[in-house]
Every structure is written in C-alpha cells, then in structure tokens.
Image (tube, grey):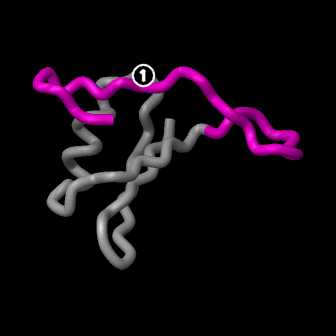
C-alpha cells in the first residue's frame, strides 16, 4: 500500500487462514516494497490511526526493508 497525501493507508479487510491450521485468522500484516529510507517510526505513525494496531517491526536482510504490523 502507498501512503497518500492524507497519510491514510488502505487496509485489506479480507483474511486468509493457513491451510490445515486450527487457529483463527492471523493478526500480522506483512509489508513489503518499502523504500530504503522508510523508518519504523513512519510506519508506526501511518498505522496508529487504525483501531486495533499494536506494534510494527522492521527487518532488513540483504536489501530493501520489510515490516510486520500486529493488529
């Protein structure tokens, strides 16, 4: 998703479970295609406007960063 000029990030409402699991829907959103200068604080600010947002963690292995947001 791309943050627009109003700092709103579109959120997908559809949830897919893993095959064969007996747990409920996953509460973690995987975020990829982030720019090399994207920061964890920017993501926290963008997602904090959504109900249920708990935390975000960034990882950068061998290139562009990815993030995981927990709701």
Q: Is residue 25 magenta?
A: yes
The answer to which of 8 and 71 lies nearer the viewer is 8
The answer to whether 5 is drawn above or below residue 34 in the figure is above
Q: How many marks?
A: 1
Q: What residue appears at the point 42 percent right and 22 percent down from the top-left corner? A: 51
Q: What residue appears at the point 76 percent right and 44 percent down from the top-left corner? A: 18
Magenta-tinted stretch:
1-26
The answer to whether 57 is drawn above or below residue 15 in the figure is below
Quadrant in the picture for residue 44: top left
The answer to whether 52 is drawn above or below residue 17 in the figure is above
Could you say whether the residue bearing mark 1 is in a helix, strand or loop?
loop
Helix, strand or loop for the magenta stretch, by majority: loop
Residue 30: x percent and y percent?
A: 48, 48
Say whether residue 68 is left or right of residue 35. Answer: right
The answer to whether 58 is drawn above or below residue 10 in the figure is below
The answer to which of 35 and 67 lies nearer the viewer is 35
Q: What residue appears at the point 50 percent right and 35 percent down from the top-left corner? A: 71
Question: Residue at the left extreme?
Answer: 5
Q: Which residue is mark 1?
A: 51
Q: Is residue 63 magenta?
A: no
Say whether residue 1 is left or right of residue 68. Answer: left
The answer to which of 45 and 62 lies nearer the viewer is 62
Quadrant in the picture for residue 60: bottom left
Say whether residue 4 is left or right of residue 10. Answer: left
The answer to which of 46 and 20 lies nearer the viewer is 20
């Amino acid at each position: 998703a791309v943050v627009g000029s109003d700092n709103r990030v579109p959120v997908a409402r559809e949830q897919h479970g893993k095959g064969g699991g007996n747990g409920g829907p996953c509460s973690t959103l995987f975020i990829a295609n982030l720019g090399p200068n994207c920061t964890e604080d920017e993501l926290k600010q963008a997602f904090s406007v959504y109900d249920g947002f708990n935390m975000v963690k960034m990882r950068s292995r061998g290139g562009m960063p990815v993030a995981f947001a927990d709701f």
